[in-house]
Image (tube, rainbow, N blue to C red):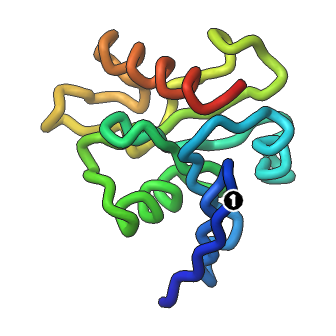
């Protein structure tokens, strides 16, 4: 599976044949750009996976696991990745929903689809604040 990279100031677009809509957000972006990545069945919500170490996120997949795979292929470490949903019509603090199957990881003391550690939740929110205006 080959990768094609197209760079812009705001997004690095990863074009993988089976995951064409997933984008890695590395710098500040706006809600309109994210809205263009929403899946038709999800309404105003976009799935995202945040890399807490690199302060980036992948968005636009049908499954958090797809976004996680793109980040792993691009140098992220699994223990730094957390799945969230972003409700683009809500205020920033209400925008983030901590709910993803990839968050279930007993080895990191997280036994639910949510994010149980308050510090990790705050790091996720801080990363979202850095990347979305």
Going by the image, does 102 lie left or right of 42?
A: left
Q: Residue furthest left?
A: 107
Residue 63 x %, y %: 57, 54
Going by the image, does 97 lie left or right of 72?
A: right
User: Depth check: 84 or 15 in front?
Assistant: 15
Residue 55 x %, y %: 42, 37
Q: Looking at the figure, which quarter contains the C terminus? A: top right
Residue that badge 1 annotates: 8
Residue 88 x %, y %: 78, 28
Query: Please, is residue 120 above or below residue 100 in the view?
Result: above
Query: Please, is residue 127 above or below residue 56 in the view?
Result: above
Kindly identify the residue that appears in the image at 51 percent across and 61 percent down: 66
User: Depth check: 85 or 59 in front?
Assistant: 59
Going by the image, does 35 lie left or right of 119?
A: right
User: Depth check: 18 or 51 in front?
Assistant: 51
Counting every numbered tag in the picture gives: 1
Kindly identify the residue that appears in the image at 48 percent across and 27 percent down: 127
Going by the image, does 11 lie left or right of 105?
A: right
Residue 97 lies in quadrant: top right
Q: Residue furthest bottom?
A: 1
Q: Residue furthest front?
A: 9
Kindly identify the residue that appears in the image at 48 percent across and 42 percent down: 56
Dot 1, crowdedness within 10 Å: few (<14), some or many (≥20)? few
User: What kind of element bears circle 1?
Assistant: loop
Kindly identify the residue that appears in the image at 70 percent across and 64 percent down: 21
Residue 60 x %, y %: 67, 53
């Amino acid at each position: 599976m080959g990768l094609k990279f197209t760079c812009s100031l705001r997004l690095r677009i990863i074009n993988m044949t089976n995951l064409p809509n997933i984008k890695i957000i590395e710098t500040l972006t706006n809600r309109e750009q994210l809205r263009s990545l929403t899946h038709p069945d999800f309404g105003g919500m976009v799935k995202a996976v945040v890399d807490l170490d690199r302060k980036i996120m992948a968005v636009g997949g049908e499954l958090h696991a797809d976004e996680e795979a793109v980040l792993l292929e691009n140098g992220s470490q699994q223990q730094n990745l957390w799945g969230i949903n972003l409700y683009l019509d809500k205020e920033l603090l209400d925008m983030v929903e901590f709910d993803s199957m990839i968050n279930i990881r007993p080895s990191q003391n997280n036994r639910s689809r949510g994010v149980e550690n308050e510090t990790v939740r705050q790091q996720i929110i801080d990363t979202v604040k850095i990347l979305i205006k």
